[in-house]
Image (spheres, grey):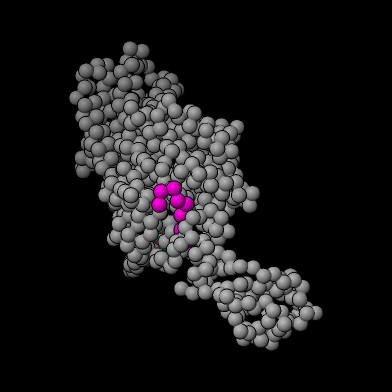
């Protein structure tokens, strides 16, 4: 049994040139020797900073770009060799407001893509109604898209990506620029799609979202794989233990310096929050540092103390920041 | 079946989506009034200079008026995918490309035909050009041929503008070329040296010639040779347009030129 998405030593570079008369050429290595696989029914997250190569990887998987070298297979089919066979079985949704026909109604936008994907004329009407219902746009389908809010557009994008009932879905930052409630609804939708058996590859910059949704995550930077595993594995793989957040006021720099030298303390960061100071102390794995940190800070100035386990964001920052 | 639906239903949907002149506030001044002004301008200049007849100018300019909806309609309907950021989605779909793009030509042709017929009728009426009713059906057929042939050339420009990211310059320049080279206001015989050689490779030249002959009393059969020649040229342009689109799509996967979303 092969994986649903299989990426092996994938590379992609871009040649760009600038200047009109003295053209200078540059090569950007957007994806470098990337390998990972996504199993059937899995919700897989691709994380990484801006320009890491996430969208480029997705564009290769959805047949828009050819790999410079390496192999990518979707549903066992080589995306470079047989793009046509891949296209009808995958769906692609990207975040943002563009990519819709502004002057057409929501229903006409869907109708057009239903034609492009060869959805049979008999099932088109019910399929479109079903999807409008799913993305909570029923009743608004006759309105032109130019009047739609960002969240509505995003949901329409998802409906478009689902028209032909694809087995694999590629979601590139689906919640970008959406309000918290809208983003939550979108995440619920993604969970439902996963429950319906779709294999999903998702990119996002929201760590909480990735933690909530993804079965496994690949973190990439500068086109290369930095880490791969379940959210729990990633959190424990990096070299951080407990995190203590102390809200104080008027803490002298000498106190901060003293905390930094304490046993078991990995990093200390201090930032201003209103009239308060926020001290974030990361401990080494296994070290119990709450007591000694608090002892180093005068009781009088402590406003609030919070101890928490490292989040995916802590792990991500440790991975990407250190690379 | 599905390809036929993409041609007709898809073509119309995408034309509505991407050609923003279908709004009456743009359509009437640009596609209806402007060609009529152009007919009047050249007819009055002709009267002043004692050149040609009103009928000569009505026919030339009315047939050429198809070029605005053809050139602009076709480039918008194809290169517009780029500005609406839907090109990537289109290229990621399994839809047959020839059907997808050529389907957009059908509403373009229909639009151009209507525009041409209106300018013809209104121009003839304003200038009191007397054409026997029996000649109108043949004229309508020829005007349709002109719209089809101009759309063929427009597909080539549309394909190119997909890559050069500029729809206005090419369409505008070509409008000027057609106005000068196709015998619209100046008979081909009066064009200097090398120019008629260019005219022979442009759409509309033969349609305008055929329409003038039919208006003067010739039958459709009599101008059949010209019409066939025009349609052969059109097929050439269509084929060239399709080849350019295919080439751009293939090279885009390697060079990342069209995949922008
Ligand atoms: N068409 C292109 N031409 C030239 N360079 C490109 C092209 N597309 C992407 N790149 C470059 O490739 C690198 C990776 O870009 P990519 O869009 O894949 O990043 P990303 O991980 O999706 O970033 P973001 O989180 O900002 O969306 C960047 O350096 C980018 O400038
Ligand atoms: Mg991206």
Residue A248 visible in rendering: yes
- Tell me what residue is drawn at x 28 percent, y 40 percent: B242
Please name whichever residue, A227 or A176, is drawn nearer the observer in this view of the structure: A227
Magenta run includes residue A42: yes
Residue furthest out toward the left: B225
Q: Which quarter of the figure has residue A308?
A: bottom right
**Residue B79 % position (x, y):** 39, 44
Q: Which quarter of the figure has residue A240?
A: bottom right
Badge count: 0
In the displayed structure, A127 sits above or below B240; it is above
**Residue B245 % position (x, y):** 30, 44
- Tell me what residue is drawn at x 53 percent, y 57 percent: A210
**Residue A125 % position (x, y):** 48, 28
First to last magenta residue range: A39-47
Residue A18 visible in rendering: no
Magenta run includes residue A26: no
- Tell me what residue is drawn at x 38 percent, y 59 percent: A36
Specify whether A186 is left or right of B120. right
Please name whichever residue, B243 or B51, is drawn nearer the observer in this view of the structure: B243
Q: Assign ligand 1 to one image quadrant.
A: bottom left
- Tell me what residue is drawn at x 29 percent, y 32 percent: B149
Please name whichever residue, B101 or A131, is drawn nearer the observer in this view of the structure: A131
């Amino acid at each position: 049994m092969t994986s649903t998405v299989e990426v092996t030593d994938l590379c992609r570079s871009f040649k760009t040139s600038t200047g009109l008369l003295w053209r200078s050429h540059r090569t950007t290595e957007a994806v470098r020797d990337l390998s990972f696989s996504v199993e059937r029914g899995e919700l897989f997250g691709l994380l990484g900073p801006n320009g890491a190569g996430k969208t480029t990887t997705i564009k290769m998987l959805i047949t828009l770009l050819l790999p410079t070298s390496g192999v990518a297979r979707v549903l066992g089919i080589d995306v470079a060799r047989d793009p046509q066979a891949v296209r009808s079985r995958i769906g692609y949704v990207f975040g943002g407001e563009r990519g819709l026909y502004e002057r057409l109604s929501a229903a006409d936008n869907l109708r057009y893509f239903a034609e492009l994907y060869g959805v049979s004329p008999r099932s088109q009407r019910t399929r479109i109604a079903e999807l409008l219902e799913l993305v909570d746009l029923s009743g608004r389908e006759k309105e032109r898209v130019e009047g739609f809010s960002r969240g509505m557009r995003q949901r329409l994008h998802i409906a478009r990506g689902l028209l032909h009932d694809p087995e694999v879905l590629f979601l590139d930052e689906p919640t970008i620029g959406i309000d918290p409630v809208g983003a939550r609804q979108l995440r619920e939708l993604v969970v439902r799609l996963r429950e319906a058996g779709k294999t999903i590859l998702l990119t996002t910059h929201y760590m909480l979202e990735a933690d909530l949704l993804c079965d496994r995550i690949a973190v990439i930077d500068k086109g290369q794989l930095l880490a791969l595993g379940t959210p729990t594995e990633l959190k424990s793989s990096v070299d951080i233990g407990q995190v203590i957040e102390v809200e104080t006021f008027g803490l002298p720099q000498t106190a901060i310096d003293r905390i930094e030298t304490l046993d078991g303390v990995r990093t200390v960061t201090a930032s201003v929050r209103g009239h308060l100071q926020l001290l974030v102390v990361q401990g080494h794995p296994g070290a119990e540092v709450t007591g000694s940190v608090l002892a180093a800070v005068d009781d009088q100035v402590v406003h609030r103390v919070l101890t928490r386990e490292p989040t995916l964001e802590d792990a991500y920052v440790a991975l990407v920041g250190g690379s | 079946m599905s390809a036929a639906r993409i041609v007709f239903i898809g073509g119309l949907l995408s034309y509505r989506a991407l050609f923003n002149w279908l709004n009456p506030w743009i359509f009437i001044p640009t596609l209806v009034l402007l060609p009529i002004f152009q007919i009047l301008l050249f007819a009055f200049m002709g009267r002043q200079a004692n050149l040609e007849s009103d009928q000569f100018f009505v026919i030339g300019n009315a047939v050429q008026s198809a070029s605005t909806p053809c050139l602009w309609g076709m480039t918008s309907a194809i290169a517009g995918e780029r500005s609406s950021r839907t090109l990537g989605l289109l290229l990621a779909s399994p839809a047959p490309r020839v059907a997808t793009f050529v389907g957009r030509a059908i509403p373009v042709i229909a639009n151009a035909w209507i525009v041409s017929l209106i300018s013809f009728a209104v121009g003839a009426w304003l200038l009191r050009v007397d054409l026997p009713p029996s000649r109108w059906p043949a004229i309508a057929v020829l005007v349709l041929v002109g719209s089809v042939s101009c759309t063929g050339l427009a597909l080539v420009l549309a394909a190119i503008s997909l890559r050069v990211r500029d729809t206005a310059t090419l369409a505008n320049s070509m409008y000027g070329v057609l106005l000068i080279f196709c015998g619209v206001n100046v008979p081909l015989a009066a064009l200097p040296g090398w120019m008629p050689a260019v005219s022979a490779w442009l759409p509309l030249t033969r349609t305008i010639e055929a329409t003038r002959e039919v208006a003067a009393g010739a039958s459709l059969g009599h101008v059949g040779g010209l019409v066939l020649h025009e349609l052969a040229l059109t097929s050439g342009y269509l084929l060239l347009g399709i080849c350019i689109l295919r080439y751009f799509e293939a090279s885009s996967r390697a060079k990342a030129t069209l995949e922008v979303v």
